[in-house]
Image: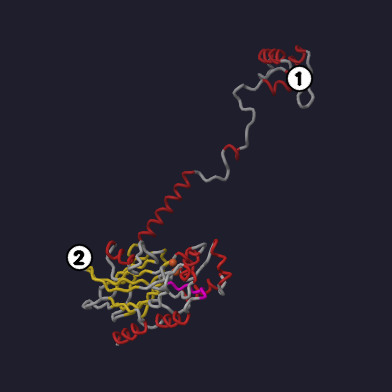
Amino acid sequence: MANLTGAQAPNPADIELFRTLAAEHLNAEGKPNITRIARLMNKPRRTISGWSIRYLAADDAPRIEMPAFVVNGDDEEPIDEILNRKEKLFERKAKANADRQWFEIKVNETRPYGILLVGDPHLDDDGCNVPLIRKHLAYASQDGVYAVNIGDSSNNWVGRLERLYAHQETSKHTGKRLVKWFMLESGASWLCWILGNHDVWGEGADFHLMLAEKKIPVIDWRAQFTLKHPSGTECRIDASHGRKGSSIWNNLHATLRSAKLGELADCYVTGHTHHFGLEHLEIAERRHACWLVQLRGYKYMDSYALRNGFAESQLGSSVLMIVDPSPDARTKVQCFEDVDLGMQVLGMLRQ
Ligand SMILES: [Fe+2]
Ligand SMILES: [Fe+2]
């Protein structure tokens, strides 16, 4: 039979004879004596030399041998090293997570001070109530007033929703500029920023974390933290962009649920739903009093709310919380939906 080169395949009997002779006739180096075997078989020396390469290899020897980068792999990190690295990563993440559990912020105030609880800003939305938020930010820039951002600082449309940029005046780029200004240049003394659903879409979480690096705690969705005063008193705040549960009868349903079933806090504040609720609640069975705050935010004339039949709240874009750090305060926290009035009261209390 001719092979692909046109040469005749050797006769199996010839190969058998060749193997026998190759075992019997060795040269001084212990290898088959090619010249003698060629003469004995009456074949050209070149043919016998070729057969010695093709047919004398041990049957279990590989016919082909791949280069080292195939057999051993050349750019794959060893699994042990991957696991060592992941172990350290897990330890760092676990520590970061533990550090955020009821983290402490020192507020060096001896007189009553204000915290503006800022509802969903949606700064780049055409319906953002800019006059109102500018007025509130001016308050948050005053001495003795601080601020907490409940999240959804911009629309930050992504994916299928990105088409909505065609229906709003502010571009994605300008939206980011507004957020940067809001965090770093608006004058507000931020205690904490919560990231809402809009904030984390796409690369949003990284964007906010990089902006705030080493300046402001930026916490995804829910932050529970304690304000520590020089007097030794403290104020616990549970701030969550959204919460589990809803009720058409009670705007504070989800916030109340956290207060009743969750850990004790002096103020539970929630955003996300764009409606308002406020209550000073005593939970007698837990011997505890707290405030429930559902912030309305600054997004007005919302077409989504219109089409889905949600009536538009007018109150509670932000709420001003006044904290009295003195040890003998009858009521540690007071909250004002009317931020103007709250600022007047704060002014009197700080005199
Ligand atoms: Fe929102
Ligand atoms: Fe939201």
Query: In the figure, is residue 213 to the left or right of 279?
Result: right
Q: Residue at x 35, y 81 (%)?
A: 338
Q: Nearer the viewer, residue 84 or 223?
A: 223
Q: Residues within 10 Å of mark 1 (few under 14, many from 20)?
A: few
Dot 2 amino acid type: Glu
Residue 221 is drawn in which quadrant? Answer: bottom left
Q: Nearer the viewer, residue 308 or 227?
A: 308
Q: Assess mark 2: CB under 8 A from ligand 2?
A: no
- Upstream in the sequence, badge 1 or badge 2? 1
Residue stretch in magenta: 120-126
Q: Quadrant of the N terminus?
A: top right
Q: Which structural element holds mark 2?
A: helix
Q: CA distance from mark 1 to mark 2?
A: 99 Å
**Mark 1, residue position:** 1
- Residue 120 placed where, x, y %? 43, 72
Q: State how many labels appear.
A: 2
Q: Which structural element holds mark 1?
A: loop
- Residue 45 placed where, x, y %? 77, 19
Residue 218 is drawn in which quadrant? Answer: bottom left
Query: In the figure, is residue 281 to the left or right of 243?
Result: left
**Mark 2, residue position:** 285
